[in-house]
Amino acid sequence: MSENMMTIREMCDAFDVTPRTLRFYEAKELLFPVREGQKRLFTKRDRARLKLILRGKRFGFSLEEIRQLLDLYDMGDQQQTQLARTYDIARARLADMELQRDELTEAIDDLKNQLKWGERMLASMNTPKRAAE
């Protein structure tokens, strides 16, 4: 296609997503491809938005949070509001992720200890008992 427009297939290849994913984001009004009959053509802006959507999803942002952040782009304040809101959401998400990591680390340590206990128990059960002398 052209430098400015990409087909759905080109978008899928470039961002490693499915056509269904792109149609879903379009239905959720996160992407706004140009329609030429049945054909969807994605602009440079759509590509930038998709990149941000995928990054937001990777970080655990909800689609609603992502939509709100993308909508703040056009406020006319040189993205100050968008950046500040993104920062706030990201700080909260980081705190959640760190808490989840700590809880997971604790669960892993507990499971490792249980496995060690199980190994000792199994080993003691398999040790032949000495006959009474």
Image (spheres, helix red, strand yellow):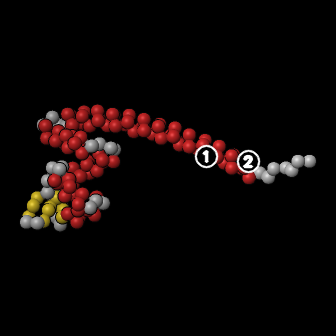
Q: Is residue 121 above or below residue 14?
A: above
| Residue 46 seen anywhere in this rendered image of the structure | no
Q: Position of residue 54 (x, y in %)?
A: 28, 50
Q: Secondary structure at mark 1?
A: helix
Using the image as rendered, state which of residue 99 and residue 15 is in the foreground.
99
Rendering coords of residue 4 (x, y %)? 16, 59
x, y percentage for residue 100? 42, 38
Sooner in the amino-acid sequence: mark 1 or mark 2: 1
What whole-number distance in Å separates the C-alpha atoms at marks 1 and 2? 14 Å
Q: Position of residue 79 (x, y in %)?
A: 19, 37
Q: Is residue 73 left or right of residue 13?
A: left
Classify residue 63 by image quadrant: top left
- Most distant residue in the left direction: 37
Q: Please, what is the three-letter code of the amino acid marked with disc 2?
A: Ser
Q: Could you say which quadrant of the image residue 91 lies in?
A: top left
User: Which mark's residue is nearer the viewer, 1 or 2?
Assistant: 2
Q: Amino acid at mark 1?
A: Leu
Residue at 16% from the left image edge and 53% from the top image edge: 27
Q: Is residue 111 left or right of residue 30?
A: right
Disc 1 and disc 2 in contact, CB within 8 angstroms: no
Residue at left offset 61%, top offset 41%: 113
Q: Which mark is residue 101?
A: none
Q: Residue at x 19, y 40 (%)?
A: 68
Of the 4 image quadrants, the one containing the N terminus is: bottom left
- Label 1: how many Cα within 10 Å (few below 14, some 14–19, many 20+): few
Tag shown at residue 124: 2
Badge 1 is on which residue? Answer: 115
| Residue sitting farthest toward the front | 132
